Structure formats: C-alpha cells, structure tokens
Image (cartoon, rainbow, N blue to C red):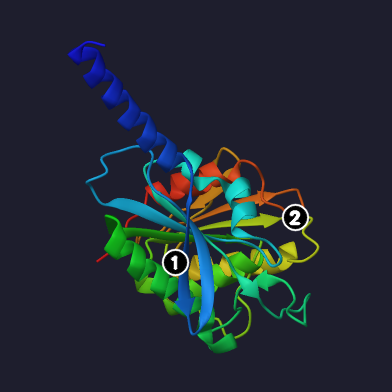
Amino acid sequence: MTRFQLILHTASFAFLTTIAYAAEPESQSWMINGVERHALVYTPSKGDHSTPAPIVFVFHGHGGSAQNVDRTMHIQTVWPEAFVVYMQGIPTPTRVDPDGKKPGWQCAPGQVGDRDLKFFDTVLANVRKKYPIDVNRVYATGFSNGGVFTYVLWSERPNVFAAFAPCAGLPLPGVHVKVPKPAFIVAGEADPLVKIENQRSMIEEIRKIDGATSAGKRIDVATLYQSEQGTPVETLIHSGGHVLPKEAPKLIVDFFRAHELKK
C-alpha cells in the first residue's frame, strides 16, 4: 500500500466511523433522587460538529419506550444536523393505569415529586456540558402522555424552549400555559382517548395565548395561524385515531427549524 493509499484509507475509515457513531444512539443514564433514569442520545450526523447545534427532546406515550418513539418519530433522520434525545419514562399512575404499572410522565407540576421535570433539567445540563448545544434552539415534542408532559414543560420551563410540538395530548388540571411560544399541535378526529372537540377547544386557547388570531393558511396537510408577535400555531388535524401520522415528524422538524428562542 502506498503512502497516499494509506492516508486515503485512514481518512475513509475515520469518516465511516464518525457516520456509524452518529447513526446509532448512545444510551445514557443519570441518577435522579436515587432512581436511575435513561435516554437515547443521537449526535448530529451532518453539519459542522464544532458549531452549536439544535436539540430536540422527545417523550413517548404511557406504556411506551424511548426505543419505540425513536422508531415512530425518527427525528434524527429528518433533522440530521440536530441532537435528538429520546427520554425514557418510569412507572407512573394515570387515569388509564391507576396502579402505575407502565412507564410514563408526570401530568402536572408537583406530581410524583416533579421527578420528570428534574430528569429533564439534569439531562439538559449534562448534554450542554458534553456537547455543543445551541441554547437558542431547544425543542420538545411528545405523543399522548408525552404530549401532556410537553405541556408541563411549556408551563414550567417556557424560557428554555424555542418551540413545542404536543401530539395527541392535552394539558391536564394544574398545567397553566401562559408564555406565548410557537406551537405545532397534532390531533386525530377519531381519537378515542383525546377527543377532537377538546383538542379544538385547546387549540383556540393556545392561539389566543400566542396571538395567532389570523385566518388559517393551508400548507400541505397542515394549517398555519400566523402571529404578529412571532409565536404562530400550526395544526395537523388528521382523520385517524390515537396515532401519529407518518407525515408528522417532518412537519414538526420544519416548524422547529423556523423558530429560535426570542430574547
């Protein structure tokens, strides 16, 4: 092997190793109040790795897992320039699981000792120390119970996030969304768990909070309500049930890309 071939081979191996690492998540863990918590962390597979990059936190539904919502939302494939963190819930009592046998998230501030808010705070602080994170481009999305927790984050940590995307979830009693933020909301007309009439009522409330009172503009399968204060609301109302439509991840990423944290 010539010197040139050796250099080329070494460079190619390094490139492929970087891509292989970025293409697979790193399983990370933290101790929160004596309980080991876990998440899957994807690093950007594209872009300048020395430049601060956006980060998306994703929360699964009740009874789900980080691995499952990774496959469903696959944010890292539609936004390869971003860090993506799939958080893992732990057994949580809910209306449909009163004994708390399945993993999920707190539904309101103060519930279960705010363990999930503490989990989020710890993970964000850790990844900011470990990776070049753009603090002006931090986002949260979640499905079902994960969507409920997304509203909890909006209520309790609004100044951390640039935008939110709750899917098939609603803020429950005790959750008070007050700070205007860009929001992408997904709801199903045939959802048996989160009734569409309740979703439509909440969308109207969010539009008022965000000042997104303009007439809706159809964009592909979504509807955009602009806001003079820079906090628009975009909705994806689909005909299905308690599911995430296949077009949702890309639309959520497109929405996130358009918004940074306002100073």
Earlier residue among tags 1 and 2: 2
Q: Position of residue 19 (x, y in %)?
A: 39, 35
Q: Can residue 133 be spotted in the picture?
A: yes
Question: What label sits on residue 104 in the rendered view?
Answer: none
Amino acid on which disc 1 is placed = Asp
Q: Position of residue 209 (x, y in %)?
A: 47, 71
Where residue 127 sits, quadrant-wise, is bottom left
Q: In front here: 26 or 74?
A: 26
Residue assigned mark 1: 210
Between label 1 and label 2, give the one nearer the viewer: 2
Residue 220 in the figure: left or right of residue 210: right
Amino acid on which disc 2 is placed = Glu
Residue 77 in the figure: left or right of residue 222: left
Q: Residue furthest front?
A: 1
Q: From what the image shows, is residue 24 above or below residue 26?
A: above
At x 70%, y 69%, the residue is 198
Q: From what the image shows, is residue 98 above or below residue 170?
A: below
Q: Can residue 165 be spotted in the picture?
A: no
How many numbered badges does the structure rendering display? 2
What quarter of the picture does the N terminus occupy? top left
Few, some or many residues within 10 Å of mark 2 (<14, 14–19, 20+): some
Cα separation, mark 1 vs mark 2, equals 23 Å
Q: Position of residue 55 (x, y in %)?
A: 39, 55
Residue 263 in the figure: left or right of residue 219: left
At x 56%, y 48%, the residue is 223
Q: In front here: 237 or 52?
A: 52
Q: From what the image shows, is residue 45 above or below residue 122?
A: above
Q: Residue furthest top?
A: 2
Residue assigned mark 2: 189
